[in-house]
Image (cartoon, grey):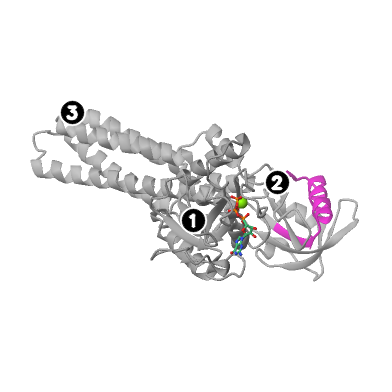
Amino acid sequence: MTIVAIGTYPGRSALGTVRLSGPETLRILNQLLRPRKTPFDFARNPRVVTLCDLVDVANHHIDEAMAVFYLGPASYTGEDSAEITLHGNPLILREAVQALCQAGARPAEPGEFTSRAFRNGRMDLTKAESVARLIEARSEYELGAARKLMSGELSTTMSKFRSAVIGLRAETEAEVDFSTEDLTFESLEERKTRVQKMIGEIDSILARARAAGRIREGISVALVGAPNAGKSSLLNRIVGYDRAIVTEIPGTTRDTLSEELQIGGIPVRFVDTAGIRSTDDPVEREGVRRSIREMEASTIVLHIVDGSRPSYDLEADVSRRNIIHILNKIDARHPEARSQADWIEISCKTGQGLGELNQAVREMVLREPESRDPILLEDRHRFHFEKIKGALERILELWDRRAPDEIVAVELDEILEHTGRMTGKISTEEVLGRIFSTFCVGK
Ligand SMILES: Nc1nc2c(ncn2[C@@H]2O[C@H](COP(=O)(O)OP(=O)(O)OP(=O)(O)O)[C@@H](O)[C@H]2O)c(=O)[nH]1
Ligand SMILES: [Mg+2]
């Protein structure tokens, strides 16, 4: 069946593209598209863009179009397909889809183009999944991690594992058939090393994925300090607009509130909190409780001190890693207000010191080990990696116990099963359905 969908953003824009894929593509193009330059034959001009008029089945003009035909299997989906670029008005694009459906296509399901690409062997499953991640990525960081999948890092690892296991399987099989006594100590040790190396690789991928998961949630930076220190003022300065209420009344901020920015491509959530002090007001007390919780959960803490007062008293423990102490209000500095060597002095009023603070936060964010070399894994990938790791560990144990090779072979087969499922070499409709249903329509 030939499918059709709008492939571009569902809003007004200069251009919008409708994609078509399936065996009827050519017939539908010939029926509804009138090339300006005649004679023009789509069949004989694959991958050539040509200016056309798009009409509906009753020959009513819809729009001018640039159309290109891809002759399968040299196309995204592996089938005959086409892209028709029109003016980017959703109404026009919808009319075009309707016309193409009247001519015999049907609306595509979410992810159906990519699912066809997978089924036609144009890409393996991990790469197909990376397409969705690439489109969804909300930060440069995620984008980088998705690109790593796209470039086939998992596929490569899986095919490496697969050939390693097939190698071990062949060696084991040879021994089952001939003689077990021939297996020398050296060759066993060498095999163990190979298996341990694979376990090491899995551990490192899983660790990078855990880190990526944490970063995807965003690094959080909590702004804490005594009431009236200028936490909300600083949040507003950082995000660049009046996000939080600022007043001269201590205890203004009750609930925590946050705003996300990107630093070096990493999403960073700045959280303004209630000033920490002991209080009888139950609402403020709840706010203080949340501040302390936020402070404990956050990756980085900005501890803000009011420099217009002689001293400060913070009823919370701020001795921890990843903390930046800030002396605020230095425009109205109290003669006795002192900061220590590594403190940063700022004024939210004049903007003084904010550049330095910005730099310090940036360095701390980028220093997080999680920022380096992330890889995004789906739950599915993690599951298969863990199964493979389990089997590899059991193999080591079996060898230590000098267990019969037939049992080792069972574990090796289990690994092959999981590498196959990971790349989609082995797949079920249920799994495929779940994966592609998370895609947008038109991809
Ligand atoms: N002179 C001066 N005043 C400031 C500066 N930063 C903040 N203020 C003032 O200090 C008061 C308290 O500021 P907020 O930002 O509301 O302080 P906060 O820490 O969020 O206070 P709570 O939410 O009550 O805990 C306001 O009147 C601000 O205008 C500064 O750098 N210089
Ligand atoms: Mg506040």
**Secondary structure state at the residue bearing disc 3:** loop
Q: Which residue is mark 3?
A: 404
The x, y position of residue 291, in whole percent, is 53, 44
How crowded pointer 1 is (Cα within 10 Å; few <14, some 14-19, many 20+) is rated as many
Pick the residue in front: 343 or 43.
343
Instruction: Of the two numbered discs 3 and 1 on the same chain, state the one appearing first in sequence.
Output: 1
- Looking at the rendered image, the disc whose residue lies closer to the viewer, 1 or 2, is 1
Q: Amino acid at mark 3?
A: Pro
Q: Amino acid at mark 1?
A: Leu
Instruction: Of the two numbered discs 1 and 2 on the same chain, state the one appearing first in sequence.
Output: 2
Check the image and report above or below for 65 versus 273.
below
Kindly identify the residue that appears in the image at 46 percent across and 56 percent down. Answer: 148
**Secondary structure state at the residue bearing disc 2:** strand
The numbered dot on residue 3 is 2
Q: Which residue is mark 1?
A: 302
Magenta residues span 83-107
The x, y position of residue 149, in whole percent, is 47, 53
